[in-house]
Amino acid sequence: MSIIKMLDEFTSENLTKKTSSRRELFSTFGSLGKKAAVAAVPFGLAGKSASASTFFQQRAHEEPFRLALTLEYLEAQFYMMALESGVLEGGSREEIAFMKISEHEDAHVALLQAVLEEAGVNTDSPSFDFTVGGMFDPFNENGDMETARAQVLALAQAFEDTGVRAYKGQAPMLMGTPWLEPALQIHSVEARHASEIRRIRGLKGWITGSERGAGMPDATQAVYDGEDVVTQGGVDLTTLDYGDSPIVGDVTAAVTQAFDEPINSETATTIANLFIVADDNGDGEEDTEG
Amino acid sequence: MKRPVVKVDFVDESPKNGKFKSRRRFIKIGGLAFAGSSFLMYSCSEDDDFNPGQQQGPDPEPEEPEEPEEPEEPVEPEEPAAFDLGSGDVGILNYAYALEQLEAAFYTAVRAGDYYSGAPAEEQELIDDLYNHEVIHREFFRAAITAAVGEGNEDMVLPDLEFNTDSIDFNDRTSVLETARLLEDTGVAAYNGAGDRLESATYLTIAGKIVSVEARHASAIRSLLNPQSADFAGDDILVDIQGTGVAYDRAADPSEIISEAGGFIATEFTADNLPSPMTGS
């Protein structure tokens, strides 16, 4: 069955019904990202959702997938450049991990592109600058290999942990569409990646509190803000009686590790925008370039 | 008559289901035997509820509203009825609760075994974390389901299960870590497959918060078993979607999960009323 056919198989009635409640809920997540400035949205998400809401009710997956594709483009290009840079030692655990992850991100790009292209949505990739205007040197353009190695791993961690949070944040938008399940199948693979990269860096595979972890640049803190949640579904899990299964060590730390938190599209976009460069004309509008 | 047969609507496979499911399959009597457990008993005398050949045809009973099926015949009055996971979101929450109970019990037993006591500090710390997380997940579900069913309906909350861990050697690192790998990978696939069965966006988000932690666990256990490798997200566990590559976690039906991990569960329960996938994707 083709993707188009699958899209045709569920009625717009179903989707419209779901959308309102989904949006309501999503707006409650919005508060998580309030502190992040809603900066330039280089791929036009903001304008689109306001002006074409009817369109979106029938195409509920497009906005989440557009965001996902941007993040996947970022990751895919990052891993490709990292592997080409020679920063990772041949045969090292880092290189093995980057090669596998790179394969996965390429596949995710291909799937999201195919889905969006069938829906007639623009799938142009933004342009990326992984040095963030010279703040980082992950590909060792300046000849300091030690710094480059540390930074290429730090950025990989930030991208993977961002990916996990961003997909999670989009899941409610995909309810009732055939795209929820594939998105979940990508989401957990990003978490596998994140865990391995974190462990390579000497951290735990999971996130404690809102700690970005040793050696992570300040600029990556936005990836971890809001991860320190202890109340799930109205239950403060630090106050539960764990009875004859006592928690080992700090309960609050364990509770925050046990649940990963979502970010909304604004926060994800703000993080991605750090690495996205404006087009040649410098006005930040992606569609003006030929 | 009581037979180890799983009702067909439990593994509902509508034609639109097939697209992304390279490993979807029907639970079979043989699968249950392999699991070595009889916890999934279905009491039934109507043969047309079990139709192993139905994948080619349209749904035998497409989308019947969830009426209670037939007035239940009294079944095996001499035995107490097995707990049924229930329907709707509560059914899925109970299903997740069962898996979290299993994982928590497993890591509890690991920490009492010789592998753990002799393990390097780094591995002990990792096992401690996994134990903590699974106990927290378990207690979260106990609290959340109890709240969801409301006062007076506590009998809809899955009771404490008993487990059969005879096949695991808790003194042996490989046995422990390979079991951990199985449970974590299975947990990931279970949550991914359950997402599309949930009605509540709140529960979907909570499931999402948990599944990525399970995936972080699976990755860590896999890299403990084979550090210098791509096993953390290995081709042995991932699947392809649309020919784009082996780059996706599985999303498995409850029937698959039960055939993979059910052998560890000693307490009999049924899963006769779990919701079907909403979109079948």
Image (cartoon, rainbow, N blue to C red):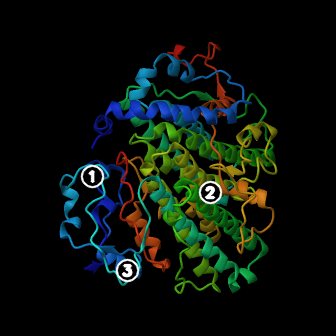
3 vs 1, front mark: 1
Residue placed under numbered mark 1 in the picture: B14
Q: How many marks?
A: 3
The earlier-in-sequence mark between 3 and 2 is 3
From where the camera sits, is residue B185 visible? no
Q: Is residue A66 left or right of residue B214?
A: left
Q: Chain of mark 2?
A: B
- Tell me if A17 is positioned left or right of A164 in this view: left
| Cα distance between the residues tagged 3 and 2 | 29 Å
Q: Position of residue B256 (x, y in %)?
A: 39, 66
**Residue at point 53%, 80% (across, down):** B163
Find residue A61 and report its horizontal and vertical position in percent. Answer: 44, 34
Q: Quadrant of residue A239?
A: bottom right
Query: In the rendered structure, the residue with mark 3 lies on which chain?
Result: B
Q: How much space separates mark 3 and mark 1, taking CA atoms? A: 26 Å
Output the chain of dot 1.
Answer: B
Hey, what amino acid is under mark 1? Ser
For the residues tagged 3 and 1, is the chain the same?
yes
Callouts 1 and 2 on one subunit = yes
Q: What's the mark number on residue B213?
A: 2
Q: Residues within 10 Å of mark 3 (few under 14, many from 20)?
A: few
Residue that badge 3 annotates = B34
Of the numbered discs 1 and 2, the one sitting upstream in the chain is 1
Q: Element under label 2?
A: helix
In the displayed structure image, the side of residue A44 where residue B26 appears, left or right: left
Within 10 angstroms of label 2, few (less than 14), some, or many (20 or more) residues?
A: many
Mark in the foreground, 1 or 2: 1
Which residue does the image show at 55% across and 52% down from the upper left?
Answer: B207
Q: Is residue A207 visible?
A: yes
How crowded pointer 1 is (Cα within 10 Å; few <14, some 14-19, many 20+) is rated as many
Residue type indicated by callout 3: Phe
Q: Which residue is more in the foreground, B113 or A196?
A: B113
